[in-house]
Image (spheres, rainbow, N blue to C red):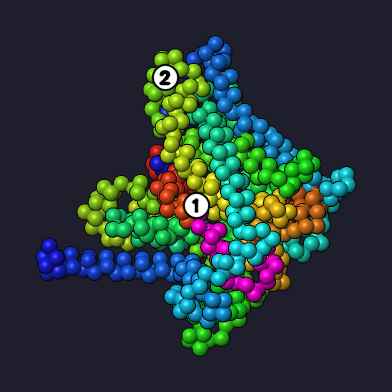
Amino acid sequence: MVDSLSLKPEAAAPAHAPAVKRGRGRPRPPRGSLRSRREAWAAHLFLVPWFLGLFLITIGPIVASLYLSFTDYSLLDEAKWVGLDNYITLFTEDPRFWTSLKVTTIYVVVSVPLQLGFALGLALLLDRGLRGLSFYRSIYYLPSLLGGSVAIAILWRKIFGADGLVNAVLAIFGIQGTSYVNNPDTALGTLILLHVWTFGAPMVIFLAGLRQIPGSYYEAASIDGAGTLQQFKSITLPLLTPIIFFNLVLEVIKSFQSFTQSFIVSNGTGGPTDSTLFYTLYLYTKGFKDYEMGYASALAWVLVVIIAGLTGVNFLASKYWVFYGDSK
Amino acid sequence: MATVSSRNPVLYRRRVSRGAKHLMLIGFGLVMLYPLLWMISSSLKPEELIFREPGLLPSKITFDNYKNGWTALAHPFSYYLWNSAVITALSVVGNLVACSLAAYSFARLNFPLKKLWFALMLGTIMLPFHVVIVPQYIVFSQLDMINTIWPLILPKFLAHDSFFIFLMVQFIRTLPRELDEAASIDGAGYWRTFFRVILPLCMPALATTAIFTFIWTWNDFFSQLLYLNNPDNFTVPVALRTFLDSSGESSWGPMFAMSIIALGPIFGFFLAGQKYLIRGMATTGLK
């Protein structure tokens, strides 16, 4: 199970096993034999849809969008090569690009740690044979299934609106609130709350990880006189770091791509005063409202570089805090 | 038992702390679910009461919001539900077929460059969709497929959601190889082995795939907003969004009512398929 959670599943199982054990004792037919050729032929047939997809709707478009990012293209006229112009404009003359980058970065940096903190905390509370575990798990998990939907974004807009739920509750205490979605200082905060609300998904992954830690470790520790806190610090946390890492990488990538929430809560504008202008929303506006397809492609590539960079940093930093056991 | 434990101070303390834990978990769960419950209750209140009552129990119940919301847009809401249902059902079929075929090949068969292809497949899981969306849109618009369901379902039939390939590969790898060998000795070819041996044993992974595809497609807003501009093709999320546009801030009651209806199928699938959702999450970490 821990193997299956690691990011490179393939490397997990066969890589460090002796070569003989490959395929569980089934000798691989020699290369070039009739059998292996038939097998390769069949394998490619099974992969036909995937190959088509890989080239037609993944690799092809990747190459095309790289090319487009160096052009001026509006879907109606021919694409016009403009060299690095899009990128130069983006970095030097486009304040909205910087705004959207800032907004998205704040969103990711604040909401992901909060979300994972809640996920881990609740997973620890729920672990170890608590009665009603599956009931609680379902309740906490439900919001992460609904959180990305338009319906919930609408609800959010209303909860934090001028005459919304939050203010109705505050009114009981005699506090007069304003609209939180129309205030540039708080609008992003409501979206961060929405993201934190969906902590159930990483929580389920944490629970699965906690279950992999052998109970005997805790028994041995408590015989040695380690208290609950000590056990958490010396057993649970180190053994859980690969899963914390996994969740971190995944959530950073995912939340950088958020769209629906900011689109609905700001009704497509990224407002008030661009305070909820997510990067994806800005890209959508440029590409599919203003039909500046070349510019939008440049935006996309900058985002890819950012995400790849962040993921790379995550992997590099993981050497210092992620514990993979003695065997690796 | 109870009297013994209440006299034993250690057990007693443990029971109290466990009770406190449950209280905390239930309290927190209520806070989590309150927005949802409030939406349900609000959808049953007369419009003017929605924002005067933060409580959950409506002082007056009415179904007017549902009646009004159902007919508030250009088409009755059932029209949008049907559009969503068609796209979702076809997406589920596409993902099941294309991803299981690819997964069998990756999990069981040997072929040249397999490692490279497999690594590419994993790479596409992490790929931000932005980098392909502009050219995809251009291609689909040149093929005259904007405002059709093709841009939404074709990628599923081409195994674009590599998440699910990965999920099924992981699952197939846990099945004993002896089954394949037995089938092969009985004269079954690869196709028969896949169809008669592997696929039936893959039911849990297929169920996970089906449920996740359902929920993701039903919820999906970005690509439906992108590709469906004609109100005749609108799906539930896009239709809900026009609510916000056309009625502004006035008709929250009907909007809430239709939102509840939009969330209904997800909730239903969640209840029915919880087991598979949780298991799928735990093995691959998908959402």
Q: Nearer the viewer, mark 2 or mark 1?
A: 2
Q: Which chain is home to disc 2?
A: B
Label 1: state its secondary structure: helix
Q: Can residue A156 be seen in the rendering of this structure?
A: no
Q: Is residue A43 above or below residue A218?
A: above
- Which is more toward the observer, B272 or A17? B272
Q: Is residue B93 left or right of residue B131?
A: left
Quarter of the picture containing the N terminus of chain B is bottom left
Q: Is residue A4 above or below residue B11?
A: above
x and y, in percent, of residue A182 in the image: 65, 75
Q: Is residue B258 magenta?
A: yes
Tell me the residue at 47%/43% (across/down). B208
Label 2: state its secondary structure: helix
Q: Are marks 2 and 1 on the same chain?
A: no
Q: Range of the magenta residues?
A: B241-265
Q: Which chain is home to disc 1?
A: A
Q: Is residue A279 above or below residue A59?
A: below
Q: In the rendered image, which residue does mark 2 sit on?
A: B183
For disc 2, the neighbor class at 10 Å (few under 14, some 14 to 19, many from 20) is some
- Which is more toward the observer, A127 or B140? B140
Amino acid type indicated by mark 1? Asn
Query: Majority secondary structure of the magenta segment?
Result: helix
Q: Can residue B28 be seen in the rendering of this structure?
A: yes
Distance in Å between CA atoms under marks 2 and 1: 39 Å
Image mark for residue A247? 1
Q: For residue B30, which quarter of the picture? A: bottom left
Amino acid type indicated by mark 2? Ala
